[in-house]
Image (spheres, coloured by chain):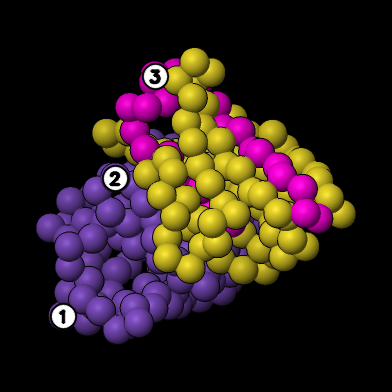
Chain colours: A purple, B yellow
């Protein structure tokens, strides 16, 4: 079965760039919308953005200026970069598979990122 | 637009609970609404998609609906079990964004 696994540094310094990877196993990365969602401690879900199978992207307007997403179909991986991080970016970061009508049917287990000096 | 959910609801085992999700602007029927369950320490899982569809493996105790008169969607869980205690999020989208409600904490006591 298809599984998603996020990975990346658990600790990032303020003003630096957060970089995460999501590896898709058991299935092909094509033909879906690949989303990043985050959840600050004790808070709700916040959509960061998505990249689709053709490389088109859409980002949360509140984060758009700091977000980059990419897809590597040869490695079955998607990546997230968030620049100029602050403590407000401390959260669990999830990757999730989506479709054209917004259903997020498969989620990774999430990875904790703490922004601290 | 925003999606507004009650902060928390509680009900007894065996009873039925309904969680609402009200869309602030635009027609609730314009874009599908999906629902997610998140148990403590776990990732969210989809329990209702496209307003009322249930993914395979989700018990039929879970049902979804939309009501254009109140511009809201609802998640109803019948025959409550202690394992249903979790946070529930509604989610929809528009042409450029995915939007989540702020979540409802369901306590089964």
Residue numbers of the magenta segment:
B13-37
Q: Position of residue A90 (x, y in %)?
A: 60, 58
Does B2 lie within the magenta span?
no
Please name the residue that numbered disc 1 is placed on.
Answer: A74
Query: Vertically, is B46 above or below A72?
Result: above
Q: Position of residue B13 (x, y in %)?
A: 81, 55
Residue B62 seen in the figure = yes
Check whether the beta carbons of the residues at disc 1 and disc 2 lie within 8 A of each other: no
**Farthest left residue?**
A54
For label 3, the SS is loop
Q: Which mark is residue B26?
A: 3
Please name the residue that numbered disc 2 is placed on.
Answer: A101
For label 2, the SS is loop
Measure the C-alpha gap from mark 2 to mark 3: 17 Å
Query: Vertically, is B6 above or below B11?
Result: above
Camera-side residue of A79 and A83: A79
Query: Vertically, is A102 above or below A82?
Result: above
């Amino acid at each position: 079965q298809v599984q998603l696994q996020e990975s990346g540094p658990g600790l990032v310094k303020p003003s630096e760039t957060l970089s995460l990877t999501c590896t898709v196993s058991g299935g092909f990365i094509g033909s879906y919308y690949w989303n990043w969602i985050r959840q600050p401690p004790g808070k709700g879900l916040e959509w960061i953005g998505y990249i689709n199978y053709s490389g088109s992207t859409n980002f949360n307007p509140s984060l758009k200026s700091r977000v980059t997403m990419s897809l590597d179909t040869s490695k079955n991986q998607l990546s997230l970069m968030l620049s100029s991080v602050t403590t407000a970016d401390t959260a669990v970061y999830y990757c999730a598979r989506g479709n054209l009508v917004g259903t997020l049917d498969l989620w990774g287990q999430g990875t904790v990122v703490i922004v601290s000096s | 637009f925003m999606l507004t959910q009650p902060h928390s609801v509680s009900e007894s085992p065996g009873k039925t609970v309904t969680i609402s999700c009200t869309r602030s602007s635009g027609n609730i029927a314009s874009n599908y609404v999906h629902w997610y369950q998140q148990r403590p320490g776990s990732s969210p899982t989809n329990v209702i998609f496209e307003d009322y569809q249930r993914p395979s493996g989700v018990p039929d105790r879970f049902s979804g609906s939309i009501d254009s008169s109140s511009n809201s969607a609802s998640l109803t869980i019948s025959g409550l079990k202690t394992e249903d205690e979790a946070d529930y999020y509604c989610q929809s989208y528009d042409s450029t964004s995915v939007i989540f409600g702020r979540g409802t904490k369901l306590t089964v006591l």
